[in-house]
Image (cartoon, coloured by chain):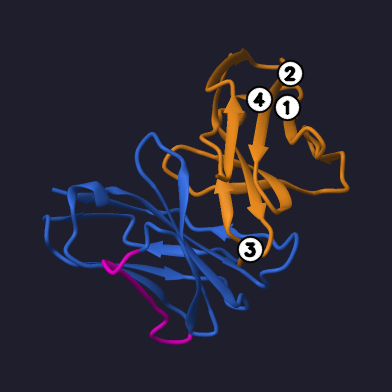
Chain colours: A blue, B orange
Amino acid sequence: EPEVTQTPSHQVTQMGQEVILRCVPISNHLYFYWYRQILGQKVEFLVSFYNNEISEKSEIFDDQFSVERPDGSNFTLKIRSTKLEDSAMYFCASSPTSTGNTEAFFGQGTRLTVV
Amino acid sequence: KNQVEQSPQSLIILEGKNCTLQCNYTVSPFSNLRWYKQDTGRGPVSLTIMTFSENTKSNGRYTATLDADTKQSSLHITASQLSDSASYICVVRAGGGYNKLIFGAGTRLAVHP
């Protein structure tokens, strides 16, 4: 069964460093998303991406964050100058369309720890 | 502000028993409501999606209800199994967005033998 895959599963980085979280969405999907979940808190929407551009973003997704689809398969989230409060589980998701009852499929997540 | 609230926060039941989880939401405009199961350290997996016009939807031992007038939903699990131990998250899709999903905090269910 097709699935969204994320790498790495766990990333430890020093405060102030840049990290890139990688995702391979399901191959025929057109819409891609990043969500994050700080430990013990709700999953929060970060950004949606379609047709090589951001279609919607939350207030969390400030200039520190950027997304890119560098090739036909990968979808990346870059976090510049990481802060301690960026420590969270980051989930990538994809969907074939964006309408109505379209299912969003989530990856297993990347646990980011900023020390 | 769009919000999804769930109760209880956590629940312990014995294997084979039934349980019901609750969700209240204030999301506008409303598109649909989903229940997800999330195992510890894993991504959420969809159980059901319900639109405004649907009152009940089943997926195996999971049955979700939706009352769009009172903005309430429930997830009923019958004949619980040890593998049902997980967080169950109520998620509302806001209309007009690119699948922008608003998550509840989840109910952590533990099924004991």
Residue contact between numbered discs 3 and 1, judged by CB atoms under 8 Å: no
**Residue named by callout 3:** A1
At x 55%, y 38%, the residue is B104
Question: Which secondary structure, mark 1?
Answer: strand
The residues tagged by marks 4 and 3 sit, at their Cα atoms, a distance apart of 24 Å
Q: Which residues are magenta?
A: A62-72
Instruction: Tell us which disc is closer to us: 4 or 1.
Output: 1
Label 1 neighbour load within 10 Å: few <14, some 14-19, many 20+: many
Q: Work out whether disc 4 and disc 3 sit on a shared chain.
A: no
Question: Which secondary structure, mark 4?
Answer: loop
Q: Work out whether disc 3 and disc 1 sit on a shared chain.
A: no
For badge 4, the amino acid type reads: Gln
* Quadrant position of the N terminus of chain A in the picture: bottom right
Instruction: Tell us which disc is closer to us: 3 or 1.
Output: 1
Identify whether A50 is placed above or below B105: below
- The x and y percentages for residue B74 are 73, 30
**Residue named by callout 1:** B77
**Residue named by callout 2:** B18
Residue B81: which numbered mark, if any? 4
Subunit that carries the residue with mark 3: A
